[in-house]
Amino acid sequence: MKLAFVYDHHNASAEWNRREFEEWLTGVFVVPGITLKPRCTTQIREHVSSAFSKEGWALDVKIDQLLNLTVFAMKGDLAFQLQTGNMSRAPYDLLKLQYLYQSEKINCAGMAVPTRDAAAAIGDNIANAERLSNELKLFNRIITVPILLVAFY
């Protein structure tokens, strides 16, 4: 697994850098031992969970007790989502991050998804960074939470 690119939505890069986390975050997605192919998502999720846990992030954080809604990880005023599944889940992840931002529970977010080609190697209709970055541009005034989108392949 390698870092492909980073998309900076609403100046998220400055926020991650201010907290000295951007370099660490992008480094999480540089793992020569992980090859993107069918049925690799468990390995990716285990690696990312381990990296976040070692850095002191809370994992699978509930954002609503009654609906049992969670985000992948939170630390301080940052939240993070990893999406290696169906494309229909990615906008839902953005909605959860926006909720946390509007509720003043976070000030910035990160999200990681595979590139289009990497998503195709994983399976059919998998979330991909090119589409998600275009959707963030389109919904610029709706999704206002600063998000650092990390694309990997």
Image (tube, rainbow, N blue to C red):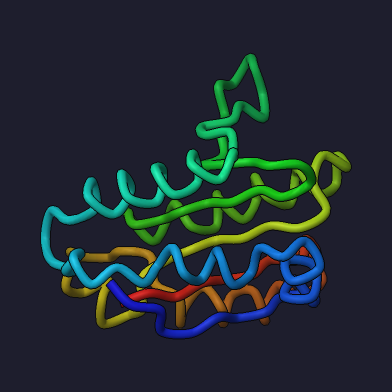
> What residue appears at the point 33 percent right and 77 percent down from the top-left corner?
2
Residue 31 picture quarter = bottom left
> What residue appears at the point 63 percent right and 15 percent down from the top-left corner?
66
Q: Please say whether residue 23 is visible from this viewpoint.
A: yes
The C terminus lies in quadrant: bottom left
Asked whether, in this view, residue 11 is left or right of residue 9, the answer is: right
In this rendering, the answer to whether 49 lies above or below 148 is above
In this rendering, the answer to whether 139 lies above or below 111 is below
Q: Please say whether residue 142 is visible from this viewpoint.
A: no
> What residue appears at the point 59 percent right and 75 percent down from the top-left corner?
135
Residue 121 picture quarter = bottom left
In this rendering, the answer to whether 2 lies above or below 59 is below
> What residue appears at the point 83 percent right and 53 percent down from the top-left corner?
107
Q: Position of residue 53 (x, y in %)?
A: 49, 39
Q: Position of residue 83 (x, y in %)?
A: 42, 55
Asked whether, in this view, residue 107 is left or right of residue 121, the answer is: right
Q: Position of residue 109 (x, y in %)?
A: 68, 57
For this rendering, which residue is in front, 26 or 131? 26
